[in-house]
Amino acid sequence: MLATDQIKGQLRQQMAELGKQNTLKRIRDSPNGTYLDGGDLGEILLPQRYVPNDMDPEDTISVFVFTDSEDRIVATTETPRAVAGQFAALKVINVNQKVGAFLDWGLSKDLLLPYREQTSHPQEGDICVVYILVDELSGRIIASEHLMEFTNNDQARFGFEEEVDLLVTDQTPLGYKAIINDKHMGLLYQTELSEPLDYGQRIVGYVTKVREDGNIDLRRDRAGYGRVKPIGEQILEALKCHEGTLPFDDKSSPESIRDEFDVSKQAFKRALGLLYKQKQIRFENNGIKLVDS
């Protein structure tokens, strides 16, 4: 029974998934490139320009499997910015009046956002937050702006202030909606933000509550003084790495503080205050200096 399970597991590993990264075995060469074993998808061509010069006949290779402009299943060693089953913020590089918008997702073939999957009617140069999927009708990999169709809060389980990855989407009167770990949708409240967020911005956040109705409350930073000590330690470490001085103080801009320390100005000022009371730093010349022990 164990041997049978192992064989099944090996077979599953060999079956290529469309729209995903796959590790596939080389089976034969052709003038156009190398064919890889795609399992149920059949032989998959890796075009010659992507075949490594040192690849041996029995080698396996990590490739992304997708469909080309003629709807043939092919492989590439190029790495997309996101794969099927993930959300991403992608730039519109072209709009075709017949089919939709084309997005730059890091491959030589652009990603189609069909008109039927649009909610914002994007123009060239716009950023779109989309979900990437394999279209059941055409078998092609496409993008969709119908984000709520691909999130589900029913099974969301988080501990208090659990750290999560967030992708900022719509702004509402209460704050910003954000996709959590490519699975759920939550809300960052405006009243708890020290600076505005950008559409399509990726940040680290913290879950504060999963409500009975399934809504998820989020914060940009941990609450209260619980994070003051870690921020203080981060400031001290940065001071030691810069000969004991830093061009930051309680008058620095929120943007510069966020860029350097990834915290709000309010939290940064609290940490500075604590370090000053502990006589570990002093303020001078529009910055802070480490006090010699």
Image (cartoon, rainbow, N blue to C red):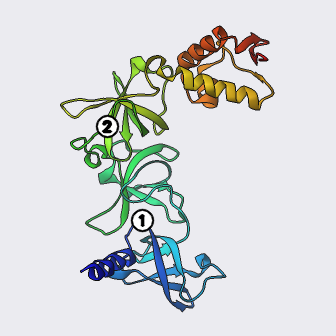
Tell me what residue is drawn at x 35 percent, y 67 percent. Answer: 140
Quickly name the residue at label 1: 20
User: The disc labelled 2 sits on which kind of residue?
Assistant: Phe
Q: Is residue 98 visible?
A: no
Image quadrant for the C terminus? top right
Mark positioned earlier in the residue sequence (2 or 1): 1
Q: How many marks?
A: 2
Query: Residue 48 at x, y = what percent?
Result: 59, 81
Image quarter of residue 11: bottom left
In the picture, the disc for residue 158 is 2
The quarter of the displayed image where residue 217 is located: top left
Position of 83 relative to 290 (above/below)? below
- Please indicate, yes or no, whether residue 236 appears anywhere in the rendered image: yes
Cα separation, mark 2 vs mark 1, equals: 27 Å
Q: Secondary structure at mark 1?
A: loop
Q: Could you tell whether 61 is left or right of 139 in the image?
A: right
Q: Is residue 268 left or right of residue 101?
A: right
Q: Position of residue 58 (x, y in %)?
A: 53, 87
The image shows residue 193 at horizontal and vertical percentages of 45, 21
Q: Indicate the amino acid at tag 1.
A: Lys
Residue at the limit of the structure toward the left, as seen here: 213
Comparing 170 with 27, the one in front is: 27
